[in-house]
Image (spheres, grey):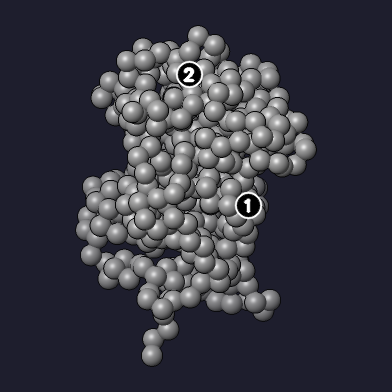
Amino acid sequence: MTHAKTLFEKIWDAHHVTQTATGASLIAIDRVFLHERTGAAALKSMAAAGRAVRDPARVFAVMDHIVDTRPGRGDGTLMEGGSAFITETRAAAHAAGITLFDVNDPDQGITHVISPELGIVLPGVTLVAPDSHTCTQGALGALAWGIGSSEAEHAMATGVLRLDRPKTMRVTFTSTLAPGVTAKDMALALLAAHGAGGGAGHVVEFAGEAVRALDIEARMTLCNMATEFSAMTGIVAPDAKTFAYLAGRRYAPAAFDDPYWQTLRTDDGATFDQEITIDAGTLAPMVSWGTSPGQSMPIDGAVPEGPARAHEYIGLDAGTPLLGTPIDVAFIGSCTNARLSDLRRAAALVEGRRIAPSIRTALVVPGSSAVKRAAEAEGLDQVFISAGFEWRESGCSLCFFAGGERFPEGSRTISSTNRNFEGRQGPGIRTHIASPETVVASAIAGAIADPREIAR
């Protein structure tokens, strides 16, 4: 009898090269992605050691993390000393003969946005990048995870990486989402229920009726937050939606009739090391309240009792309602929620309205240059601008603070990003992470607000 396998096991076995004397495995790596914060370091180190990239066609680099996103940005960055990251990555990428999506390249954008856009990530491949949110790309049925710069060197030079086999977990979302509840809310609900360390050491397969109902970009949002769950990665079995999304993209094959791809699903009877089931129909819009994504709650609830430091930093006592908490900054962007579908939904809520006069800064930063062009073709940029938002060039922007541009110190931010750590968006900044819909609803109200009320 054939052993029933999980989706992860099938991809792992297909890429398993050999087992080492210590019990670790050598796994073949199909794609490596670099960005300017890590690219130059890895490529220069390889060159200094006299090692070449084994297969340049499988390695890609992009400028995304510290690029200036202001209109007319030129070739710069606002990060002090950041220009060296850009110029050195550019030189090293050209010298290595790898594909580079430069600052003003039409295909420039955040790594985990442009890789699916271009069909670089495909079902069943292994893809690594020196970035923890590489797990985003598991939404296409790939095994994609974040690594360090030294591991990137090894993958580029040898085509393999040494790994201990992770455990497996299936998170099944049953039922269907209520109107106004999104993939971001699914991720935050999982974190709130099971903790930011709940997925440690596991590959998490997202499954169930609610996951299958999500479009591919929403699945990316869900898988993006797997690293916030401390998982190695998240993955969703590819289906007809996946193949339709990838059809015609530059690096995707012309036809999806590879027999291997047709096997990329968990077999009936396959077992996982851990199973979690969540009724998606019971979920509400979620907002983080503390200093960890696991400190999240339904928007219409009261702040629970948590670590004293979290309450002190965020400035909210236990028992305080989140609704009505004044905010200063609204930010839509990041590899979590800055794709075209995210911007469409946010624009639909804000159209014909204005952000509150108390909002000091409101930004929309598209996840890629292609997203920006598509949004502008639909007039979404004018919807946001008319509402009082700044419309930016693509990049990671103020998803994280790297020096240079910053929000006003001490601001309270409602943000479509993925992390609410202390200082994540700047010194003393208090960040509440939420869906793009919740961000615009809160910007309109000048305080944390329920997007379902605006939709009504």
Image height check: is 91 above or below 328?
below
Tell me, for residue 168, which label it has, or none. Answer: none
Residue at the right extreme of this rendering: 308
Q: Position of residue 451 (x, y in %)?
A: 42, 30
Residue beneath the point at 29% across and 29% down: 374
- Of pointers 1 and 2, the one earlier in the residue sequence: 1
Disc 1 marks which amino acid? Gly
Residue beneath the point at 35% across and 67% down: 264
User: Between tags 1 and 2, which lies in front?
Assistant: 2
Give SS at disc 2: helix
Residue 417 located left or right of residue 139: right
Give SS at disc 1: loop
Disc 2 marks which amino acid? Ala
Tell me, for residue 195, which label it has, or none. Answer: 1
Q: Which residue is mark 2?
A: 445
Residue beneath the point at 47% across and 38% down: 285
The answer to whether residue 57 is seen in the rendering is no
Q: Position of residue 94 (x, y in %)?
A: 48, 39
Image height check: is 307 above or below 365?
below
Residue beneath the point at 44% across and 76% down: 270
Could you say which is closer to the camera, residue 211 or residue 259?
211
Q: Position of residue 124 (x, y in %)?
A: 39, 63
Q: Quadrant of the N terminus?
A: bottom left
Mark 1 → mark 2, Cα distance in angstroms:
30 Å
Image height check: is 276 above or below 340?
below
The picture quadrant where one finds residue 342 is: top left
The answer to whether residue 268 is seen in the rendering is yes
